[in-house]
Amino acid sequence: MSLPHAVPSSKRPAATNSCRVCAPLGSVLAFRGLRGCMPLIHGSQGCATYIRRYLISHFREPMDVASTSFDESATIFGGQSNLAAAIKNLVRQYQPEVIGVCTTCLAETIGEDTVGILRQITKEDPELPAIIHVSTPSFKGCQYRGFHDTVEAILTATARGGERLPHVNLLPGPVSPADLRHLHEIVAAFNLPLLMLPDYSETLDGPSLASYAPIPEGGVSLAEVAEAGRALGTLQLGTTLNPGPGACLERDHGVPLVKANLPIGVRATDAFLASLAAFGPGLAWESPAAEPAIPAWLTAERGRLVDAYVDGHKYVSGKRVAVVGDPDLAVAVAGFCAEIGLVPVLVASGALTHRMASALAVLGLEAGTFEVMEDADYDSIAKRLMELKPDLVLGPSKSYPTTRALGIPLVRIGFPVHDRIGAGRILHLGYRGTQRLFDEVANALLGHQQDSSEMGYAYQ
Amino acid sequence: MDLLDDRKRQVVTAGEVRAVVCDRPSVAGSVTQRACSFCGSRVVLYPIADALHLVHGPVGCAAYTWDIRGAQSSGPQLHRLSFNTDVREEEVIFGGEKKLARALRELVVIHKPKGAFVYATCLTGVIGDDVDAVCRMATAELGIPIIPVQSEGFKGTKKDGYSAACRALDQLIGTGPTEGIGPYSVNILGDFNIAGEIWTIKGYLERMGVEVVATLTGDGRVDTIRRAHGVKLNIVQCAGSMTSVAKLMKEKYGIPYVQVSFFGLEDCADALYQIAKHFGDPEMMRRTKEIVRTETEAVLPELARIRKDLEGKKAALYVGGAFKAFSLVKALRQIGMQVAMAGTQTGGPADYEHLKELCDADTILADDSNPLEMASWLALRDVDLFIGGVKERPVAFKLGIGFCDHNHERKIGLAGFEGCAAFAREVHATVTSPVWSLVPRRAGRGLA
């Protein structure tokens, strides 16, 4: 028997404290992972400004995003001249290799033929850099969809078929720059050439600079993305995606698509590494009986992680936990929680996928023992938490007012984390990310117990 | 800096004869720091703590403005929640009026607000929802004032949003009783009670013998705003956002107003003197002088100590409104710092003329600037400090330059006399940090 789900916010007349933001934000984030890319939001300038502000508060990095700055006349007569002027001005100021154009509700609602206008602009000036367009009205989805639609738009516009090349495409989803760096490191250990899209591992967590970089260094280049259609395969992280951006490569270029959970927890990381090993030349790919060769340092990290699980298991065992986040992150973190003996009571996301419950079931979380909320707002999440009274919440900083009211700890994960520094450096993935997460979870529970004790002990 | 052609006339140095061209829409593709008119309305009205603030539009407009500013309330906290009709495809096709009406009914029952503001957005503007009509209907049905705010994002800049907010306030002002309001009574306009600043200012006014009736909108309440027309004087702090309310009240109710600033010792003292002078009570003037003297004496020793470390250092600032820029130039001078660059999002022609008089001849003045311009000036003038908001912060930090947040997100009160000391401490903490000796831009220069 499954427990009743809260009413999704789309069925109610009003959302209170939204748990999602709009699609162009996800699009900007994805475009930031393309080398030399300048995002341009087609619509009112407030959209760009708010998105910049929201992303800056999380990443604490420069976030130059252009806008076509619609005014009333553009709204009535169309934004063609605004789009042309914006492209001209940003090319002059930023000299981008690529311009990533995403659209707002406004442009979409007035029926703007953005594709047609861009074709005209490109025709008139063949010297312009590549322009990739993606339609991202926020009344049709949230940042999660905007992100994946943008990855798909980049692939569709850029990837070319041809003779197979020995690399793997990795579509990591909206994880942190630290996660992306760690994924690079892991894949490199398998001697697999990697094409990661998007790759904002450097662009959104860059070094201190002597002079301002109009577009931050780093990212995957369009030339590299062009080879996505010739890869050994595509590994797409996230199991709630249906089918997800990697499907276009399978459809158009016959690149096999492998879906995996975000590697959080020992088993999920084992599975991820096995998927990678399967791409390796001469390994399981050709002789399934052979044990996949896992690099020694990863085996060592796994060993330390399991050892830490043992050291800390009693502090977490049986504690009730709620997880809030992007669908795939929430699913993977809930899987990790179950693996260490925490008891998930609520797994919630602002996005709507209809697939979180089944993705959790695949991870062995028994339906009916916990609640799943999709399309949730923080108000409805808070109401459930007040009832469920978990011991701990893992989620974005927007969960803080609720955990504060409940007097329970919050372990900050995912996006956004607006009330701490280092959000871009939160490592969630791999044995190492799991290790960090496990230590933080166990210590949050230990710290809470210690702070609540009258004795004020200093040992454990 | 190689400025865009369309932007050249918006940048001058203070010593030039040429005026700053301003009050114009942002150039497409220039990466303006300005937001939209929705933003202007939202920031001005949101601190009214017992009102329901309902964003009629898509999720982003509401989510991005959920409790992101530090406007404090001494009572209700309703303003800190984000309410949104969460318009989706269905409403885009069939219209959102019904959903808006249902949302108001549901939310008013749950939260029992004293009034409500309904913010129109780009989306609900173009799908043609009649927000006015829904609000009229809901006011009649639900028995509280439900006020539409014409804040469609495309209808201009933040400044136009301020005007829309002022028109909304105008609908509330004058609808409440004015009995019991004394002769030395004021409203405070254009202070948003960031980090409790309005309480600091109220404290001075009360010691002067001035009665504060309504605060617009920091720590604001619907019922006190309804009786705001009973005062004898309006005090306007954030001139850009609220002067139009003051003007309206002067026309409608004959209430005079003074434009003041409570940032910086000089301006803060001047503000209190202006108010005392207006009431013309010698006893009040005596008390005001006493307040200024004791409060100034309390902070001067610390300011002097801090000044020793900051003397001759250079600052740049980029803020929303010009009045804050004026105060900051003076406040920085007070702690020994020069201003190498000053810019605003919404300054008008007279503001920039005044800024030219205040600043040094080589100070760069810029209207509606962008990150590339600012970054180039910060580096060119080799400044030690940048003052701005969250969007300006990474420009400074990426270049290894100190930063002071003077926008609405900050958690430290910077107004009033004690605010001057807090400001000086903030500046000192960032400018004298030992980390700068490690950043590439200053490599080899040693400690500050």
Image: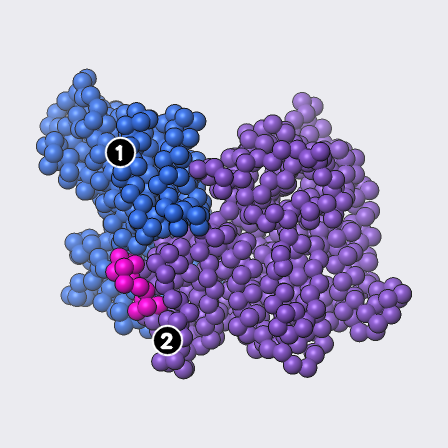
Chain colours: A purple, B blue
How far across and down, in percent of the image, does residue B120 sit?
32, 45
How far across and down, in percent of the image, does residue A382 sit?
55, 33
Residue A121 has which mark? 2
* Amino acid at the residue labelled 1: Arg
Chain where mark 2 sits:
A
Task: Please say whether residue A82 is one of the residues in the magenta stretch.
Answer: yes
Give the alpha-carbon distance from disc 1 to disc 2, as whole Å. 45 Å
Judge whether residue B73 can be spotted in this image.
Answer: no
Please state if A80 lies on the left or on the right of A8 as rendered: left
Chain where mark 1 sits:
B
In which quadrant of the rendered image does the N terminus of chain B lie?
bottom left
Q: Quadrant of residue A445?
A: top right
* Amino acid at the residue labelled 2: Ile
Residue beneath the point at 38% across and 47% down: B94
Task: Please say whether residue A455 is one of the residues in the magenta stretch.
Answer: no
Please state if B216 lies on the left or on the right of B80 as rendered: left
Judge whether residue A122 can be spotted in this image.
Answer: yes
Secondary structure that dominates the magenta span? helix
User: Can you say whether B367 is above or below A229 in the image?
Assistant: above
Residue beneath the point at 62% across and 33% down: A4
> Of helix, strand and loop, which one carries label 1?
helix
Residue projecting furthest to the front: B94
Q: Which residues are magenta?
A: A71-83
In which quadrant of the rendered image does the C terminus of chain B lie?
bottom left
Q: Which residue is mark 1?
A: B136
